Amino acid sequence: MEKKDKVIVIGLDGATFNVISPLVERGELPTIKKVLENGASAHLASTIPPLSSTAWASFMTGMTPSNHGAYDFIIKKQGSYGSKFLNGTLIKAPAFWETLGSAGKKAIVQNVMGTYPPKPVNGYLITGFLSPPGAGYTYPATFQEEIEQRFGNYPRAPGTSVPPGGEREYIQQVFDNFKKRVDITHYLLDTKEWDLFVVVFEATDILQHAFWKYYAEPQRIGKDALFIQNAIPEIYRRFDVLLSQILEKIDKNTTLVVVSDHGFNCLHKVIFMNNLLMDMDLLTLKKRPSTQLKKLCLKYHLNAETLVTIGEKMGFKIKGAAIENKKGQQIANKLFLSQHDIDWKKTKAFSVGVGGHIYINLKEKESQGNVSFTEYRELKAFLTRMLENLKDPETGENIIKEVYQKEELYQGQYASSAPDLSILPHEGYFPLYKEHFISPSFLMKPSVSGGHTLHGVFIMYGKDVCKGVKIPQMNIWDVASIVCKIFHVDASHMDGKVPDGLFV
Ligand SMILES: [Zn+2]
């Protein structure tokens, strides 16, 4: 009897050939070298902008953002200036493991971003990043007990703030976290029945955000310099070991896919879109004294972030993972210049979300909208020109590579709630967003040194995959269609396509 086709998809949050290729050449990633030579690969285009929330949603649904609606980590509420944090219920298309599950395929899904709250699968699921602490994180719910009996609490990824002087401990913590998750992956591979196995690891993203400058400028010195400089190559080497262990476990009917949601490069400055819109007189603050006082405080860098930093330097442990600390955010929003200080009746454009997306305050759409449809086009054209020509005042460099109109990027069924303008920044720049204003100017030095870039990694290796082929153009939403094709399951409802020349 012919053996069943199986697929294992390993996701790396933010992996890049910029790091992989030199390591492969130096012989430090022997397994990746082998699968690259004997399989297919591509510089995988992420979503625009390359945000993990949106890119993983496109990965799991096979859909472009306007067909799943997860435009950002922070999603604007329709008809309101408020926002909500992304969770799985806001991703409005089925995951490919659900499509395959309906066709009888058994799936194990571990740690994919946006899978909380856990939805039923034909198999087992452990939710990923954005799962609230303490909440049930598995399907079936009883599966959590099995995991915790063997491994203790599921290891949550460390936050991105590295305590100064504590770099070594922090890196070790990321490695340990990776190891614990790998142990769970092995356990699931060995003990459960599956046709499809999907697992995502975040360690690459965490270490590249925190330590890119040490990787890119290795002349830095200090007590732990070598260990810190080595952190990024080391996580790729550890991943290579995992791949070799997996290849030993699978048979020739199993196809291996490695995919990352975006690439990485240095990050020099972060862009605060609402500050920029304020500078352009398109976002207006209230005239009331309290707002003006807060504006003055911001000018002298007296804001929530600064106070937290000062507090931490004095030894107080204030900052949790910011996104989990909703109450803290609410207090900061009241005390410091925030959305509450915006005079919506006079505001023409505003940004919601960490992707730097811009919404026009349309009369027909927003509760206090004041832009008519006739003004809308002109305003968008003006903003597009301004953004395309936006320069870093310090260096004179262009900041934004491309500005996209809503119609260009978003034509799917949730296009009506899509941002009016979206941007792709030049490498070295990336938007940052907080509900309260944390910087007096629109550019700021970031607290991390690595940032997301458009092109991630796609590697595929298996009996039906072309050997040594490089696919010239591929999008992250193509991956789901490719996996469905291996199982001969119809994926025509997806936006993704199977690229020519991938299969023999
Ligand atoms: Zn990231």
Image: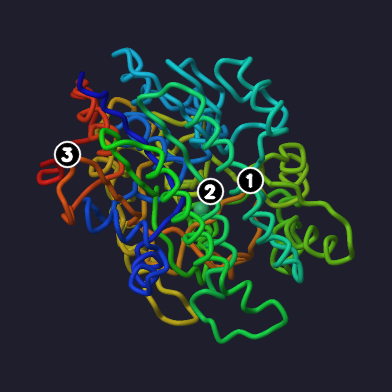
Q: Secondary structure at mark 3?
A: loop
Picture residue at 40% right of the left edge, 35% below the top = 57
According to the picture, the residue beneath numbered tag 1 turns out to be 157
**x and y percentages locating residue 285 in the rendered image:** 61, 51
- Identify which amino acid the numbered label 2 is placed on: Glu
Q: Is residue 161 left or right of residue 121?
A: right
Q: Vertically, is 78 above or below 64?
A: above
- Identify which amino acid the numbered label 3 is placed on: Asp
Q: Residues within 10 Å of mark 1 (few under 14, many from 20)?
A: some
Q: Quadrant of the C terminus?
A: top left
Picture residue at 34% right of the left edge, 26% below the top = 96
Q: CA distance from mark 1 to mark 3?
A: 35 Å
The disc placed on residue 202 is 2
**Contact (Cβ within 8 Å) of mark 2 with mark 1:** yes
According to the picture, the residue beneath numbered tag 3 turns out to be 464
Whether label 2 lies within 8 Å of ligand 1 gets the answer: no
Q: Residues within 10 Å of mark 3 (few under 14, many from 20)?
A: some
User: In the picture, residue 142 is in which quadrant?
Assistant: top right
Q: Secondary structure at mark 2?
A: loop
Picture residue at 71% right of the left edge, 67% below the top = 168
User: In the picture, residue 66 is in which quadrant?
Assistant: top left
Q: CA distance from mark 2 to mark 3?
A: 29 Å
